[in-house]
Image (spheres, coloured by chain):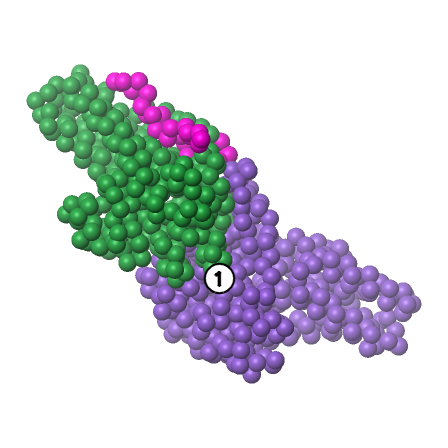
Chain colours: A green, B purple
C-alpha cells in the first residue's frame, strides 16, 4: 500500500491563520516546510516557485487572500473591501499564465460580493470557508482524475511525464501523477520516465521524489533523451498536466511539453493531458491567445549554482509552450475524459 | 569582419616546444590558457576534458608525443624508440574510447618507423613535422567543410545547433560551426540558437562562447525549447556535428540530436550534419551497430555542484543517440556535400 506524502499545503489555525507549505525549491536535497503569515509571503512563494503547479497556486491564492484580509476584520466594510481588492490584485500579479490563480481569486471576490451587507468578520469567515472548499475540491478533483484516467494507462509498460503534475502541484494527489498513482494502486505495472525538465528541474527534483515516496518505479532522464526513450519503445504513453487549456483543447504547459507531444506523435505513442476543468479558459478560442510567461535569464545561465552561459550571451527562457489539440489524444478531467479533443467535445464536458 | 577566436591548440617554440591550449573546463566563467610542457600535462589535459572533441584530442596527442620524446634527442636511437613507445602507450590510456587519439598516435609511430636509421634528433624533427601536418590537415578540413556547407545556410534567418561542433573540438574552425562562421563571413545574416545540451552543457558553455567571440548573434535555449523555436519559425535550418556515421548515413551524435532531427522534420525544417570523412565507419551498414556509451548518473543527478535527483532514484544517461539517414537532408564533409543521404551517395563520396 503506498504511503501518503506530506501535504503540499495546509491551513494552520482558524482566523487568524497561516498557510504552511513544502518549500519545493529545497527538494530533493532538503525537506523543509515554511509558514506564510503575510500576503507578501504568499506572493513571494508563488513567484519564486516555492509552491507551483496551477491547482496548488489557486489554493495558495485563496488562502493568501484570507491572510491578506484577516487583519482587517475590525475595519469598516469599505476599508475591508478596499483591502480585499488590493490583495487579490497583488496576488494576481505573481504568475501571469496560471489561470487557476485568477479563477480562485475570482471565487474569493464573488464570496465577498455575495455577502455585501455582512460585517468584515463574517466575510472573512466566509472567505476562509471558501478557501477550504477550493482546497477540498482540489483534493476531490485529483482523486477523480486518477480514476477517470487509469484505464488509459497500459497494464504493464513505461509512461513518460514532463515537469511535475503531481501532488506537489495540487492540494491532493496531483493530476497526471494521480493517474499514475491510481493505475499503480489498481495493480498496473508501470515504470515512469521523468524528464528532468530544465530549467528548474521539477521532474528531476519533484516528480521523481513523489514517485519514489509512493513506491512507483521511476527513471530520470534529460529532456533531450525523451525521443530516444520513445524510439527504443521504453514508453507506451505520455501524460502531462496543463496550466491553461483553450476552448478548442490547445493546452499550455511547462516548456518542453509541445516537444514531447510532437515526438510522441512521430513515434505513434498516445499523448494525454490531465487537468481539472478549472484549467479551461473558455474565453480563448485557441491556444494562440495564451500569454507565455518569459522568465529570467539566470534560471538558464546560472541554474545549477554555477555559471554555464558566458556573460553577455542572449538567453531565451519561455516558461510554457502550447500543445495544439490535434497532438493530444485525450484530456482527462475530474468530470470525465475528453476524447477526441475537439472544441465540441470540450464544450460538452466543460460548458461553453 | 569577425575577429578570430583564440586558438584551441598552439605549438609554442620549435624543438623543444610546448603545447598551449584553452582550458575548456574553465569556460565560460574564465578564459585560461595552459601550457603543457610534459607528456603528463598533456595526458591530464585530455583525461580531464581541458581539451575535448575527437579532432582536437588527436592533434593534442600528436604534439604530446613530441613533448614526450623531445628530451631524448641526445640519447641512443634505441633509448629514443623505447621512450617513444612508452609515451604513445601512456597517451593512449588517457581516453580509451577516442578513435582519433589512436589514429594520431599510430601516424606518429609510423613516422618513426619510416626513419629507422635516422638519428633521434632527425626523428624528433620529423615527428614535430607530422604533428604539425595533423594539425594543419585538421584546419584545412574545417575550412573545407565551412565552404561546402555555406550555400545550405539561409541568407538571413535562424539556425539551431546542438552540443559543440566548433573550433574548440578541432584545431580549426570546427565542423557545424565552421559552416556558420563561413556563412557569416560570406555576409549571411544568421542568428544561431544553441541548445544548452544537457547533461554537460557544451552548447551553453562552449558553442555560445565561440559564436560570441566571432561576433555571430547567438541565443542559448534549453534543449526542451527547440520545438517551440521551430514552431515560432525562429529557425530555418538545423546543423550539428557527428561522432560516427554508418555506411547508410545514420549518424551518431550527442544525445538529443535525434530529438531535434525528428522535430525539424515535423516542422519542415532541413536538418544538416557536418563531419569530416574520417567520421564515417564504413564497417557498419546502419546506425544500429553503433554502440551507445552510457555515462555516469552523477552527470545528471549532480550536474553542476548541486543535487537535483533524490538519492536512490534511477537515472539513465546515454551519451549519444543515432539519427536515421532519412531525417538528414545532407551531410557536409570536407570533400563535398552528400545529398540526399543514401548508402550509394555515401559510397560515392567516401568510398565503400
Q: Residue at x 53, y 73 (%)?
A: B249
Q: Residue at x 44, y 65 (%)?
A: B261
Seen in the image, is B122 located left or right of residue B9?
right
In terms of depth relative to the viewer, which is nearer, A62 or B221? A62
Q: Is residue A34 above or below residue A225?
A: above
Q: Name the secondary structure under disc 1.
A: helix
Q: Residue at x 70, y 69 (%)?
A: B103
Quadrant position of the N terminus of chain A in the picture: top left
Residue B177 at x, y percent in the picture:
51, 67
Magenta region, main secondary structure: loop
Residue A28 at x, y percent in the picture:
48, 35
Residue B80 at x, y percent in the picture:
87, 66
Tell me if I can see residue A319 in this picture: no
Name the image quarter holding residue B183: bottom left
Q: Is residue A206 above or below residue A14?
A: below
Q: Residue at x 66, y 62 (%)?
A: B98
Tell me if I can see residue A83 in this picture: yes
In terms of depth relative to the viewer, which is nearer, B303 or A181? A181
In terms of depth relative to the viewer, which is nearer, B187 or B159? B159
Residue holding disc 1: B257
Q: Which residues are magenta?
A: A1-30
Seen in the image, is B127 located left or right of residue A152?
right
Amino acid at each position: 500500500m503506498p504511503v501518503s506524502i506530506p501535504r503540499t499545503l495546509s491551513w494552520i489555525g482558524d482566523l487568524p491563520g497561516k498557510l504552511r507549505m513544502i518549500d519545493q525549491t529545497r527538494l530533493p536535497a532538503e525537506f523543509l516546510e515554511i509558514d506564510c503569515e503575510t500576503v507578501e509571503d504568499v506572493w513571494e512563494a508563488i513567484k519564486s516557485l516555492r509552491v507551483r503547479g496551477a491547482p496548488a497556486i489557486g489554493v495558495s491564492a485563496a488562502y493568501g487572500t484570507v491572510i491578506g484580509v484577516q487583519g482587517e476584520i475590525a475595519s469598516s466594510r469599505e476599508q475591508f473591501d478596499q483591502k480585499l481588492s488590493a490583495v487579490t490584485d497583488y496576488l494576481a500579479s505573481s504568475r501571469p499564465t496560471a489561470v487557476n490563480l485568477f479563477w480562485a481569486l475570482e471565487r474569493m471576490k464573488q464570496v465577498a460580493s455575495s455577502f455585501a451587507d455582512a460585517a468584515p468578520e463574517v466575510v472573512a469567515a466566509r472567505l476562509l470557508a471558501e478557501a477550504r472548499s477550493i482546497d477540498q475540491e482540489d483534493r476531490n478533483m485529483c482523486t477523480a482524475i486518477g480514476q477517470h484516467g487509469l484505464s488509459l494507462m497500459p497494464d504493464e509498460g513505461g509512461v513518460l511525464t514532463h515537469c511535475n503534475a503531481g501532488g506537489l502541484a495540487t492540494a491532493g494527489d496531483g493530476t497526471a501523477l494521480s493517474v499514475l498513482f491510481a493505475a499503480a494502486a489498481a495493480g498496473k505495472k508501470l515504470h515512469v520516465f521523468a524528464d528532468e525538465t530544465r530549467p528548474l528541474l521539477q521532474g528531476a527534483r519533484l516528480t521523481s521524489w513523489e514517485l519514489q515516496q509512493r513506491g512507483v518505479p521511476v527513471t530520470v532522464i534529460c529532456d533531450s533523451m525523451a525521443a530516444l526513450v520513445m524510439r527504443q519503445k521504453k514508453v507506451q504513453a505520455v501524460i502531462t498536466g496543463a496550466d491553461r487549456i483553450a476552448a478548442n483543447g490547445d493546452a499550455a504547459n511547462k516548456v518542453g511539453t509541445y516537444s514531447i507531444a510532437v515526438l510522441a506523435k512521430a513515434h505513434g505513442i498516445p499523448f494525454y493531458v490531465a487537468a481539472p476543468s478549472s484549467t479551461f479558459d473558455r474565453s480563448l478560442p485557441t491556444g494562440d491567445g495564451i500569454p507565455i510567461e518569459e522568465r529570467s535569464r539566470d534560471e538558464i545561465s546560472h541554474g545549477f549554482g554555477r555559471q554555464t552561459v558566458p556573460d553577455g550571451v542572449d538567453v531565451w527562457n519561455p516558461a510554457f509552450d502550447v500543445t495544439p489539440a490535434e497532438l493530444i489524444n485525450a484530456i482527462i478531467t475530474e468530470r470525465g475524459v475528453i476524447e477526441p479533443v475537439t472544441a465540441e467535445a470540450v464544450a460538452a464536458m466543460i460548458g461553453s
